[in-house]
Amino acid sequence: MSPLASIVLATLAGGVLSTLVAASTLALGPAWIPRLVSFAVGALLGAVFLELVPHALEAGEAQRVMVVMLAGLLVFFLLEKLVLWRHNHGHAAHDDASDESEHDHALHGHGHDGGRSGLMILIGNGVHNLCDGIVIAAAFLASPALGIATTLAIVAHALPQQVGDFAVLLHSGYSRSRAFATNVATGLATLAGGLLAYFALADMRDALPSVLAFAAASLLYVAVADLIPSLHRRPEPLETVKQSALIGAGIAVVALVGVLLDH
């Protein structure tokens, strides 16, 4: 299969298919969301440290790769600060919960949307999905194994996010059918990002290590800054064991994909 065909299929899986699966999991109840989050943490960390970073280091200078990763982490920190400031601006009377990230609000199904409209959720999703598409395309341009492992990680972290987004949209007054249709539409932004990155990077192989490093920073930030803190809300020993097992399962799946496709 050509890289372009792989990118199209993977971005559709990352954007549209994850929306379909998320919609089907709504009937499973909120208890499933922390399980998905734990698995997603493992898949993201596995994709970063077992696939993306090693490939970036193989293809580019180590110092350059590390500098780009560091810069990427700082960029995502500032972007999230900007989003938080924008959502909280003019709402100083909100309680401490309003200082949490939009992602955590969605995951834990708070009974209000903190003043966020359904439209803002959809715009944010569109931008996020566009970035996911760029990450997927860069990974497939490096190698098919890296592309599949990265797609798996993106789908894993998209599922709990999409479940939360459905809850926010429904609370904002959307019907179930409209929330589903609009989420599928924003999922197509993943395909757009993938195609954009493919045609931009196909003849710019020298830039690929930096793009992979930036992609690694993106996934690492999501895992460490957004997902792991939500797991700390359940510090009980048994829950910690379950979380650790699912994180390990996520890492193992990514590692297995890499082994099977590299040989």
Image: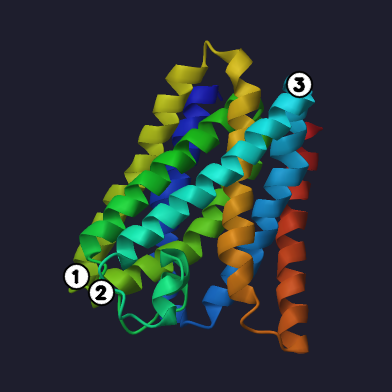
Tell me how far mark 2 sits from mark 3, CA to CA: 47 Å
Picture residue at 31% right of the left edge, 71% below the top: 168
Relative height, residue 235 to residue 172 (above, below): below
Q: Which residue is mark 2?
A: 170
Type of amino acid at the residue the image marks with label 2: Leu
Q: Amino acid at mark 1?
A: Tyr
Q: Quadrant of the N terminus?
A: top right
Q: Is residue 167 visible?
A: yes
SS at mark 3 in the image: loop
Q: What is the secondary structure assignment of the residue under circle 2?
A: helix
- Which comes before the other along the chain, label 3 or label 1? 3
Residue count near mark 3 (Cα–Cα under 10 Å), binned few <14, some 14–19, many ≥20? few
- Does residue 61 lie above or below 153 as drawn? above
Which residue position holds label 1? 174
- Point out residue 77 in the picture as x, y percentages from the top left corner: 53, 51
Query: CB of mark 2 within 8 Å of CB of mark 1?
Result: yes
Tell which of 90 and 263 is nearer to you.
90
Q: Secondary structure at mark 1?
A: loop
Residue 99, placed above or below residue 248: below
> Marks 2 and 3: which is nearer the front?
3
Residue farthest toward the top in the current orientation of the protein: 203
Residue 61's disc is 3
Q: Position of residue 75 (x, y in %)?
A: 52, 43
**Left or right: 95 in relation to 154:** left
Q: CA distance from mark 3 to mark 1?
A: 49 Å
Determine the image quadrant of residue 72: top right
Q: Quadrant of the C terminus?
A: top right
Label count reads 3
Q: Nearer the viewer, residue 53 or 20?
A: 53
